[in-house]
Amino acid sequence: AMGVALLTHRERLVQHVGAMPPGMQDVDLSLVDSLVVPASLHDVDGRFVHLNAAAERAIGLSRAQLLGRHFTDPVPQEARENVAEQFRRAVECGQPTDFETVFIDASGQLRGVRAQHLPLCSGDAIVGVLILAFAARRPPSVGPDPQPRLTPRQREILNLIAAGLSTSE
């Protein structure tokens, strides 16, 4: 099966720019857009297929600049292996992951972030990953952050995003 092995091949451009990957046509993008935290949607190879305004602000790049690029592009070299490993776990095992890492924003600033990779399922297949980013209040070296809380409404939105996918075959 294609997919996870291609994580490192960032040369593979999105064949159909603007077309949603198979199985992801049912994602309600307005729900992703309504999340207050930076959220981005990725195909199973890790490419950006959508991101909300909060994610654009956090990275400092527009949706148009990021679509089709790999999610590790803004991640510094030394953190990429860990981040890719977390993503693989979401794609291969369907396990949500929750971890701290860093990324480099458009101004070249290194920023700590707490990331969650949430697998999106359509039927039995994992068709993509929703990545959420929470501000890390301290540098990653200081130890784990207190758990930031999504409001019940935000949780509900995430559940709706997941439910919208799991009902489709």
Image: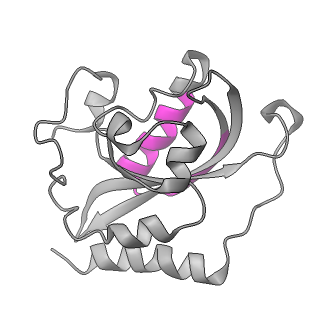
Residue 61 can be seen in this image: yes
Q: Is residue 55 magenta?
A: no
Q: Residue at x 11, y 42 (%)?
A: 16
Where residue 126 appears, as percent x and y from the top left, is 29, 58
Q: Residue at x 34, y 23 (%)?
A: 8
Q: Quadrant of residue 139?
A: top right
Which residues are drawn in magenta?
82-100
Q: Residue furthest left?
A: 16
Which quadrant holds the N terminus?
top left
User: Is residue 92 shown left or right of residue 82?
Assistant: left
Q: Residue at x 20, y 26 (%)?
A: 12
Q: Residue furthest right?
A: 142
Examine the rendered structure and indicate whether residue 29 appears above or below residue 98: below
Where residue 86 appears, as percent x and y from the top left, is 51, 41
Q: Residue furthest top?
A: 77
Examine the rendered structure and indicate whether residue 13 appears above or below residue 113: above
The number of callouts visible is 0
User: Is residue 22 shown left or right of residue 32?
Assistant: left
Q: Quadrant of residue 123?
A: bottom left
Examine the rendered structure and indicate whether residue 168 appears above or below residue 39: below
Q: Residue at x 64, y 83 (%)?
A: 152
Which quadrant holds the C terminus?
bottom left
- The coloring applied to the image is one colour
